[in-house]
Amino acid sequence: MNRGAAGPEAVLLLALACAGSFVVILDATIVSVALPAIRVELGFTDTTLPWVVNAYTLAFAGCLLLGGRLSDVYGQRRMFVLGMGLFTLARTVGGLVSSAELLLAARAVQGIGGALLMPVTLSLLTTTFTEPAQRARMLGTWSAVGAAGAAAGPVIGGLLTEWAGWRWVFFISVPIGVLAVVVARAVLPPRSDDVPRPRLDALGAVLVTAGLVGIVYAVMHAAEADASVWSSLLAGVVLLGVFLVHQARWSREPLVPLGIFRLRSVSSGNVVMLLLGLGFFASPILLSLYLQDVHGYSPLHAGLGYLPIGVAQFAGAQFAGPLSVRLGVRRAAVLSCLLGAAGLAGVALLIGVHASYVTSVMLPGLVFGFGTTAAFTPITVGATSGVPPHQNGLAAGLLNTVRQTSGAIGLAVLSVLSAAVAASWRAAHFGDDLNALAHGYTAAFAASAACLAIAGIIAAVAMPGAQRGAGISVSARNPGQRSGMPRERQPSRRSR
């Protein structure tokens, strides 16, 4: 197959990548709506119910980096089939279980499957679509499908839970998974035996997975501030420190060759993605809670209330490719991050007990939904540019690890901030619960806006403006320009 062409096989590869992204991201939002029904039928307590989400999140975030490396070692075909197969099997089991313990085990296995699958969906695109402008368009489509999954999750979950039962929340994506496995076995080429296979750094994989799980667990339970939280945080930090030393000095073939961070595109792209994830990924849950807690919406109505923002996210992802082609990845990332920051700041300024949904949620939500989602494509293009082909899976896994871990940390930190501000307001105003909650959510959205604004500033300062073979070429539109970004000064030969 011509790796730069857009023939039938390339279209199928794009469909496979989008299918993987859709089911993984859909799962992040569709299950949350069904939690009350799951609690009643399986006997979860208030303290164990969050683990229906946490078991998946911890396994997913902890294994993403390993998943990216396994893609490089064993090949995209094998890891796509294994990841999608595990994910689909675990979802089937999750819909059939009769006990809380089995559901939590199924969710953990599902997280592992998602972690094996997600880096492959990204590396498939970066290795298949090598022409820069085409790569940006395909990544825009990939992001748009993911945004559609995130937006559709609450609505589909609410409808299925209310009309068919919570088990269908798990069954709904099983046919997609089965079809994707069949197509992947037929379309994806096996890993060539002529290419030397690197060794898998097993010790490094154990260290980084355990370290990430420890830190994410501690942050998710930061509000409890008990001994287990502090010990988990300390253990996670120590394990990640040992992991870095192991990568730098002890490992012959490191899981994460630290030299990859010398690439300006990789290091700056991951920092910007970290801030974007911290500020953005909590927003759907915070808005849903705000509409339910302050304005008394039902879960289904709250999901429908987020739908216009989801449409804006889809539009932002669709425009991201052409925007990156026209402006270049740096300018597109800066503009998108600042637009997202403006929308989140609008939510922070306008929400309140007596605020209307249209002016306080929908209109600023359209702005941040479009801007934040449009930012993912140029950041992804930038963070995976200039990477040697044998490290494509590593770069994809690294970026996805930052993206997912930052989302989990952002949700935990912003939830704690919201609760603390609400408690302070309630104490100062004699138990005014609704206004206290509204002020808490205001503080959380203000912090989200600050994260996006800082991300835009760092993107402007640190992200490369154009790169050899990685920038968004528009030579067809402007033949006189060598390879770069329109309206951006070409880098000197030395800077390249």
Image (tube, grey):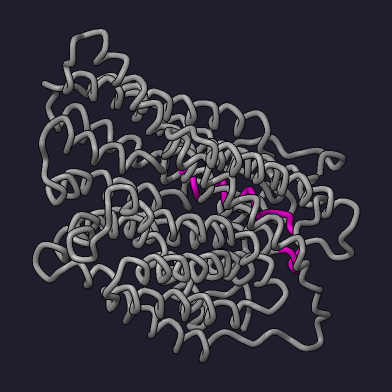
Residue 277 shows in this picture: no
90 in the magenta segment:
no
- Count of picture labels: 0
In percent of width and height, residue 23 lies at 38, 67
Question: Which residue is located at x 64 percent, y 36 percent?
Answer: 488
In percent of width and height, residue 166 lies at 20, 66
Question: Which residue is located at x 22 percent, y 58 percent?
Answer: 39
Location of residue 433 by image quarter:
top left
Residue 281 shows in this picture: yes
- Please determine whether, in this image, residue 127 is positioned above or below residue 35: below
Question: Which residue is located at x 32 percent, y 82 percent?
Answer: 175
Q: Nearer the viewer, residue 419 or 460?
A: 419
Q: Nearer the viewer, residue 261 or 166?
A: 166
Quadrant in which the N terminus appears: bottom right
| Range covered by the magenta-colored residues | 375-391
In percent of width and height, residue 346 lies at 30, 24
In percent of width and height, residue 123 lies at 60, 66
388 in the magenta segment:
yes
Residue 361 as seen in the image, left or right of residue 86: left
Q: Residue furthest top?
A: 428
- Please determine whether, in this image, residue 429 is positioned above or below residue 359: above
SS assignment for the magenta stretch, majority: helix
Residue 114 as seen in the image, left or right of residue 386: left
Question: Which residue is located at x 35 percent, y 78 percent?
Answer: 93
Quadrant in which the C terminus appears: top right
Q: Nearer the viewer, residue 142 or 344?
A: 344
